[in-house]
Amino acid sequence: MNDDELEGQQPNPERTTQESWQFANPPVYRGSTVLFDSYKVMCDEKTPYVYGRWGTPTSDAFCKAINFLEGGVGAIVTCSGLAAITTALITIAYPGSHILIDESSFPATLRFCDEVLTKFGVVIEKFSGTDIKEINEKILPDTVLVYVDFPGNYGANIYDLSKIKKKSAKTYILVDNTWATPLFFNPLKYGADIVVHSTSKYIAGHSDSIMGCIVVAHTDLFQRIQNTSRALGQYASADDLNLALRGLKTLEIRIRQHFDSALQIAAWLTTHSAIEKVFYAALPSDKSYPVWSEQFKGAGGVLTFFFKKEFEKNVPDFLNNLKLIKLGWGWGGYETLASASTINFGECSGRIAVRLSVGLEPTLNLLKDLELSLQTL
């Protein structure tokens, strides 16, 4: 088996014992205090563990695994996906600096930029759509960050990162890769400097964990973000780390099922007379499909669709009539969830978007649930 055949294989960096026996899973280290054999060891800068918040064998195991999958120089864990995003932003931004961000990004990220970073003199500018020319025209010499969230809050934006032209060595590209996971896309290969994940979604995969992580492409930048993370008191609990580690071991099987079901459902929705538009990058009709098909190995299970205008008033009834599919704002877990919100940007501004996070239930059962609910409109 060569290196290409090993690509995407799940790592087991936590198995470090030199004994002739091993447990399949390592122990979970829950602790704040580290004990030392001597004062010399206690003061040695090379001592791997000094305090629980700064790292444990459990956090190291996860960081090694996610860094291996993304191809970075190092990884950092945080208490949530949003904390991963804000930690990276705080590291890079400074008064007078310019940040360019996709207007379809996670709303909480936009809120942090608009309501927090601007208080400290950071200039926030948004871009829309997938027009690389527009993005490049907005990049300035003092642009410190281009923030990309694939595929955006309603699944419409995937573009070629390698065509983004930096005008300064101090300009970084940050990609939220939660939707695709490192098994389906590796942003660092296409010019990104920072990758963030909400491990609460597909990585942990069971809607019972809140955690985030940051993977960095350059050693100096990694050190800066790590210093910021420690200064902010960021950490991830031992139990959340363990759930994320466990999730990584089954991620490949789960994410492929999410993808397969979502693609079937997206294709079926495009044929329904009440549906006007479906956004899912893996559909050949989707505007993101050319880039997706060239650079991605698969797609996450989240898709968005819009009813024809005459049916928009029935969106609450459609959601309420679902039986197997539950209502919830989260996504990336084993259960299929539906939600709806009014979009205030892009080509569908003012319209109600219905979001489906397709889970692991039998696809035919999900299709039947959708069909029966649509029949009530």
Image: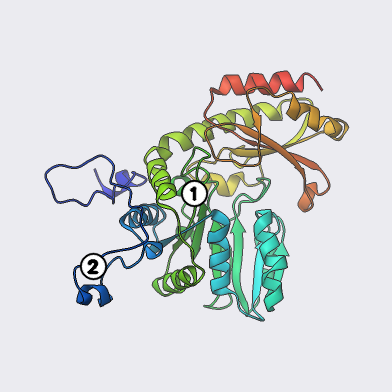
Q: Is residue 340 above or below residue 364?
A: below
Question: Label 2 is placed on what type of residue?
Answer: Phe
Give the structural element (helix, strand or loop) at label 1: loop
Residue 151, labelled with which disc?
none
* Residue 31 x, y percent position in the rendering: 35, 56
Q: Amino acid at mark 1?
A: Thr
Residue at image position (59%, 28%) is 264
Residue 256 placed where, x, y %? 47, 35
Q: Are marks 1 and 2 in contact (CB under 8 Å)?
A: no
Marked residue nearer the N-terminal end (1 or 2)? 2
For mark 2, give the secondary structure: loop
* Residue 148 visible in rendering: yes
Location of residue 82 with respect to 366 vertically, above or below: below
Residue 145, percent across and down? Answer: 59, 70
In the picture of the structure, the residue carrying the numbered disc 2 is 36
Residue found 59% across the figure and 33% down from its top:
358
Is residue 139 visible from the viewing direction of this image?
A: no
| Residue indicated by mark 1 | 199
Give the left or right position of residue 249, taking residue 331 as reference.
left
**What quarter of the picture does the C terminus occupy?**
top right
- Quadrant hosting residue 335: top right
Q: Of all residues shown, which one is farthest toward the right?
A: 310
> At x 34% / y 53%, what residue is drawn?
58
Q: Residues within 10 Å of mark 2 (few under 14, many from 20)?
A: few
Q: Nearer the viewer's eye, disc 1 or disc 2?
A: 2
Q: Is residue 80 left or right of residue 58?
A: right
